[in-house]
Image (cartoon, rainbow, N blue to C red):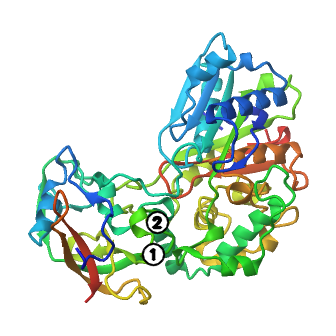
């Protein structure tokens, strides 16, 4: 292993979240939700919030680190980082950026956070209200291609066409998230189970790839995760979840305009996933539990394929509830209920769930988890993914 | 504009303020499909950009191409995400590949019945759809089976 690696140098030691709400139902302002999540993450870690000296987020989070630092009374703000790119592709990258800052000494205690109250600002699932559009949008919005579901739908259509994938795959992913949420009191869909018949009868959002239950929720909430050096982690009260590897980016011309990405029928991970495994020094078969961002079930499908859990031609056999459900599935997936059924915390909730699995504290605990993976924001660019491990994996 | 595929009130395209894609939008008004081609290496590219992605030349030309292609992918949105679409019902969007122009792709609507079968690989031809009454008149490029 080369010296230029993050492997084992940084660990997650505290996690926290606000109450998760349906969009528009939070009684608290978005900034308050951010503070609640950060304070709870500090409590979980057993540290004073004033010890936080760095911030990392993504997708142009509105809660400015300087304002948070002022609110918390932080004496020395040492690191403020924003990962480029919209969507949830930056979750793992934000963790990785914070970890890099710790590893090279820019900061000692970084909080990775995301606060998003869609009910207080614009909802992601609605088209922009502007009467005119220019740039890339001028070539799509006038044709009714505006929302994420519509912008990404044709990538999935092409992938499923190329590999003969049936919609049963998407149903299995959706039902698995809802099944897991029934054991998770934090989940917005807790107590609201989903069965196959209801899924099959749900309306199309975008035919032939997105029914209602294939799409993430729109929520109000915040989540936060505190990371420190491996040395510091040993002295804190929680079982550390060490960062073994992380990677971000996208392949050739992924961001080319008007849906001209070279590798179109994909989730943008073709070059990212191999780098992830290389830095972590593990392979897909080593992973005990997987959290994979659901903007849409199609994104999960393609991201899981691109991370090597099955070949694209094997989707119809691999994606079954039996294979995906905790605790006994081959690759337990989205064990908190994820963006579909816990909360669309823009994917950071999935990262927190990976930490819980390493600790052994999940509502849908997989036995003896040593390696937990988190995949962020499929189909956007840049995307990112990350592998965490318990102490015995170092 | 009663003969437009989608209802009135959809977002209207305007050229980029920096002038990048003025030749495309002026071309559609004339019923011509103009796309980018590198003056240095001959590479076709889309969407519009200031530089050739292949040889990194800034010598980007605009060239008229025949309005025909193959369906590369498709989707049929049912859920309206814009007020103008509330009463429209499902509509079909296609991604069309232009094999005679370096396999660049364009987005448009597939004209015809809203429930027609869409087949990846099937040939389509461009149909220019003028919106002359818009504050800044513009023309969309739609597609139909050829």
Is residue A270 placed above or below A322 in the rendered structure?
above
Q: Quadrant of residue A42?
A: top right
Query: On the image, numbered disc 2 is attached to which residue?
Result: A150
- Is any part of residue B42 visible from this angle? no
> Which numbered tag is attached to residue B75?
1
Q: Chain of mark 1?
A: B
| Horizontal side, residue B139 vs residue A107: left or right | left
Q: Quadrant of residue A256?
A: bottom left
Residue plotted at (58% across, 41% down): A93
Query: Residue A118's x, y, as percent?
Result: 58, 47
Is residue B56 placed above or below B124 in the rendered structure?
above
Residue plotted at (27% across, 52% down): A134
| Badge 1: residue crowd in 10 Å (few <14, some 14–19, many ≥20) | many
Q: Are marks 1 and 2 in contact (CB under 8 Å)?
A: yes
Query: Residue A221's x, y, as percent?
Result: 68, 43
Query: Residue A184's x, y, as percent?
Result: 84, 54
Q: Nearer the viewer, residue A297 or A66?
A: A66
User: Which element carries disc 1, helix, strand or loop?
Assistant: strand
Q: The C terminus of chain A is located in which quarter?
A: top right
Q: Nearer the viewer, residue A56 or A4?
A: A56
Query: Residue A13's x, y, as percent?
Result: 79, 31
Outermost left residue? B30
Q: Chain of mark 2?
A: A
Is residue A130 placed above or below A200 in the rendered structure?
above
Q: Nearer the viewer, residue B111 or A306?
A: B111
| Badge 2: residue crowd in 10 Å (few <14, some 14–19, many ≥20) | many
User: Which element carries disc 2, helix, strand or loop?
Assistant: helix
| Horizontal side, residue B94 vs residue A99: left or right | left
Q: Quadrant of residue B69?
A: bottom left
């Amino acid at each position: 292993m080369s010296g230029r690696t993050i492997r084992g140098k940084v660990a997650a030691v505290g996690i926290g979240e606000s109450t998760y709400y349906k969009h528009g139902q939070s009684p608290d302002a978005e900034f308050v939700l951010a503070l609640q999540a950060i304070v709870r993450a500090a409590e979980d870690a057993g540290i004073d919030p004033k010890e936080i000296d760095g911030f990392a987020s993504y997708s142009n989070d509105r809660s400015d680190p300087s304002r948070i630092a002022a609110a918390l009374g932080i004496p020395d703000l040492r690191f403020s980082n924003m990962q480029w790119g919209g969507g949830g592709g930056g979750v793992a990258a934000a963790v990785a950026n914070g970890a890099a800052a710790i590893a090279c000494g820019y900061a000692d205690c970084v909080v990775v956070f995301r606060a998003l109250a869609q009910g207080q600002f614009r909802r992601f699932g609605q088209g922009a209200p502007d009467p005119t559009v220019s740039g890339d949008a001028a070539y799509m919005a006038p044709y009714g291609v505006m929302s994420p579901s519509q912008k990404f739908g044709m990538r999935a259509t092409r992938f499923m066409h190329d590999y003969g994938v049936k919609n049963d795959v998407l149903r299995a992913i959706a039902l698995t998230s809802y099944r897991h949420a029934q054991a998770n009191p934090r989940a917005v869909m807790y107590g609201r189970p989903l069965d196959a018949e209801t899924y099959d009868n749900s309306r199309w959002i975008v035919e032939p790839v997105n029914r209602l239950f294939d799409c993430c929720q729109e929520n109000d909430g915040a989540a936060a995760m505190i990371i420190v050096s491996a040395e510091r982690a040993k002295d804190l009260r929680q079982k550390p979840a060490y960062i073994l590897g992380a990677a971000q980016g996208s392949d050739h011309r992924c961001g080319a305009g008007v849906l001209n990405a070279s590798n179109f029928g994909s989730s943008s991970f073709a070059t990212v996933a191999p780098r992830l495994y290389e830095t972590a020094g593990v392979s897909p078969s080593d992973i005990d539990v997987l959290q994979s961002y659901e903007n849409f079930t199609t994104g999960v499908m393609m991201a899981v394929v691109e991370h090597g859990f099955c070949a694209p031609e094997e989707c119809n056999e691999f994606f079954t509830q039996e294979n995906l459900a905790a605790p006994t599935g081959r690759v337990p997936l989205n064990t908190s209920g994820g963006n579909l059924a816990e909360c669309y915390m823009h994917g950071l909730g999935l990262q927190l769930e990976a930490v819980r699995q390493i600790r052994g504290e999940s509502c849908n605990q997989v036995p003896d988890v040593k390696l937990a993976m988190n995949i962020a924001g499929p189909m956007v660019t840049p995307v990112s993914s990350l592998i965490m491990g318990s102490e015995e994996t170092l | 504009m009663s003969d437009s595929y989608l209802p009135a009130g959809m977002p209207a395209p305007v050229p980029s303020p920096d002038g990048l894609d003025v030749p495309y939008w002026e071309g559609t008004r004339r019923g011509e499909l103009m796309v980018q081609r590198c003056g240095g290496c001959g590479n076709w590219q889309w969407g519009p950009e200031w530089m050739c992605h292949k040889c990194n030349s800034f010598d980007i030309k605009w060239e008229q191409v025949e309005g025909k292609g193959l369906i590369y992918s498709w989707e049929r949105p049912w859920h309206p995400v814009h007020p103008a679409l509330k009463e429209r019902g499902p509509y079909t969007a296609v991604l069309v590949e232009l094999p005679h122009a370096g396999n660049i792709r364009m987005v448009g609507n597939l004209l015809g019945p809203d429930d027609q079968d869409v087949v990846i690989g099937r040939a389509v031809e461009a149909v220019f759809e003028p919106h002359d009454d818009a504050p800044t008149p513009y023309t969309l490029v739609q597609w139909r089976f050829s």
